[in-house]
Image (cartoon, rainbow, N blue to C red):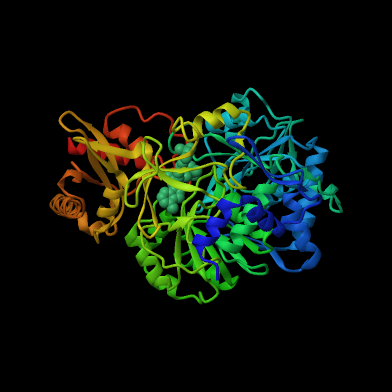
Amino acid sequence: MTTIREFHKKSIDNPDAFWGEEAKLVDWHKPFSQVLDFSRPPFAKWFVGGETNLCYNAVDRHAEKRPNDRALVFISTETDQEVVYTFAELKAEVMRMAAIMQNLGVSKGDRVLLYMPMVAEAAFAMLACARIGAIHSVVFGGFASGSLATRIDDAEPVLIVSSDAGMRGGKAVPYKGLLDEAISLAEKKPAKVLMIDRGIDKGFNKVAGRDVDYASERAKVMDADVPVTWLESSDPSYILYTSGTTGKPKGVQRDTGGYAVALTSSIKHIFCGEAGETFFATSDIGWVVGHSYIVYGPLLAGMATIMYEGTPLRPDPGIWWQIVEKYKVSVMFSAPTAARVLKKHDTAYMHKYDLSSLRHLFLAGEPLDQPTHEWLMGELGLPVIDNYWQTETGWPMLSAMPGVEKTEIRFGTPSFPVYGYNLKIFREDGTICDPDEKGIVGILPPLPPGCLSTVWGDDDRFVSTYFTLFNEPQVYSSFDWGIADKDGYHYILGRTDDVINVAGHRLGTREIEEAIQGHAAIAEVAVVGVADKLKGQMPMAFAVVKNADSIATPELAAALEKEVMKKVDSSLGAIARPSHVHFISVLPKTRSGKLLRRTIQALAEGRDPGDLTTIEDPKALEQLQKALSAAQ
Ligand code: ATP
Ligand code: MG
């Protein structure tokens, strides 16, 4: 059996042979003449001259062979809907959507912006764009009008597909007002808006001549037969903006052929999914995980995919496991933040269901702390695999790869560099770190297939943002700190702008958070560096307790704060001890579940937190401010 090491080495030493082989997982309308064109570094073109289509590979080729197999399962615990689409039905719906788009004037290369809840029509629209060569740009449904407007101006869509409302935790989140406001703010206004009316927001505003109703358009094209538009491998498939955790989001541009190959290959070697099985990613289509592992990845590999609208807790915290049992899910993908939410609830909800179909659970998006990792793996009794990647890369950069070799799962590490990624840990002078030495996670180009081909409309920004870490060598910077141990296991220590400098000692926020998370009473914690006259910076912690009883009185809270500080002293030394541990009930996060450390830090330092449009729950800020002023 090939080891991960050998597999990886082959991919780096001879990318042409390696990726030429992987490319066979995809159907090509016209074969490529060259695997890689890297004549203009750092721009990499994969499968040059080849013609293919993402929708054809994700839908048509399976609909031909297995028309009646499940393809897409839409489950909403918000509206109590459950609809199963076979590959044949999915193909029919995608062709209808494609016909509607064509009737509204969309053609190859045009942008279509999606501002949608997690409904099946969102997947139809993404696949319909892929089918006709239009470039989709999905913006997380419910984003504030300001952020939506900047994305409209950047992508210049001819059409926006939207819906009256999303639903979250039983409450309607009306979209149309936000969308109308965004369009009025935007300079590049779309000609048409296609509205999927879910009947949630009954009185939404309709703009005559611009807004078009999906149901009535669909009724006109029930027999639509829209042929696939073949695209050159490097033709863009979509634009997706990064999460905006560290500032202005960047418009990541993805190609067609490279993405198809990378995703299909990842389902085989990393996720161990097989055609005919079911993949359940709990993300949202507004994020990269939703693009790669709700919509494209599973379908490309002929798997059924679950599109779930709802929270992990309603109607009860067993809902995900109920879905796993019912649809015999074999691969599941979620985020550490969701795992920590479930950790606060009774594990009986998990054990109530037959989870024997499930082989692996993958988690990505932010650091997976050791206690949560250990807890989840113990409870589920199966490998829980941390994987590390970014919107930019489109698929995992660091992961265990059970489809290649079953390696030991260690807690707190996303394991090894994935094949195709010449990933190293770099010192600040551009040399490569020794084992156990902390540095910046970088990739020696070419970036493998599937990664961003450029920043939308801005090649210069692509180079200057990602490839100017050193003069020599040219390296893709991830903006994350990491470390690799002697055995090749990699640890992510936090973002490069998340380091705290205490009296000349550089501490990763992640290390301190990990130590605090080790305390039995703590469910979740954020640590930020706060300016300090004496020491330069001091760590400050904001913690959520598992059980409110542990901080029921000021005395109890003070005692717990001391214990937490002691815990940090014993794991990292007194230098890392937070100046304060504030207890709050919710941490400010982006809607994709990432901690907004920059925002917390600004508030703790009494500064203006700036752009807050990506925040999930504005109440978190009020709490934070209260805790801070109470401590003064
Ligand atoms: P922006 O780039 O706009 O500031 P963002 O970096 O949060 O936003 P994403 O691309 O969604 O946008 O997130 C990628 C980042 O998430 C990584 O660079 C890393 O900091 C973090 N991350 C993802 N997976 C992991 C993981 N398994 N362990 C630790 N950190 C992770
Ligand atoms: Mg980023």
Residue 616 to residue 186: above or below: below
Q: Position of residue 185 (x, y in %)?
A: 59, 24
Left-right relation of 314 to 533: right
Q: In this view of the protein, which residue sits in the foreground, 525 or 555? A: 525
Q: Is residue 572 left or right of residue 256?
A: left
Q: Residue at x 21, y 58 (%)?
A: 550
> Would residue 217 be seen by someone viewing this image from the given angle?
no
Tell me which residue sits at (58%, 54%) in the image: 11
Instruction: Return the residue nearer the eye: 37 or 25.
Output: 37
Query: What residue lies at 62% left-to-right and 53% top-to-bottom?
Result: 262
Residue 412 location (% of width, % of height): 36, 58
On the image, the x and y values in percent for residue 467 come to 50, 34
Q: Within the image, what quadrant is residue 500 found in?
A: top left
Res 306 seen here: yes
Horizontal and vertical percent position of residue 261: 66, 53
Is 326 drawn above or below residue 608 in the view shown? below
536 or 440: nearer the eye?
Answer: 440
Residue 209 vs residue 286, the one in the foreground: 286
Say left or right for 331 vs 340: right
Reply above or below: 233 against 92. Answer: above
Where's the N terminus, which quadrant? Answer: bottom right
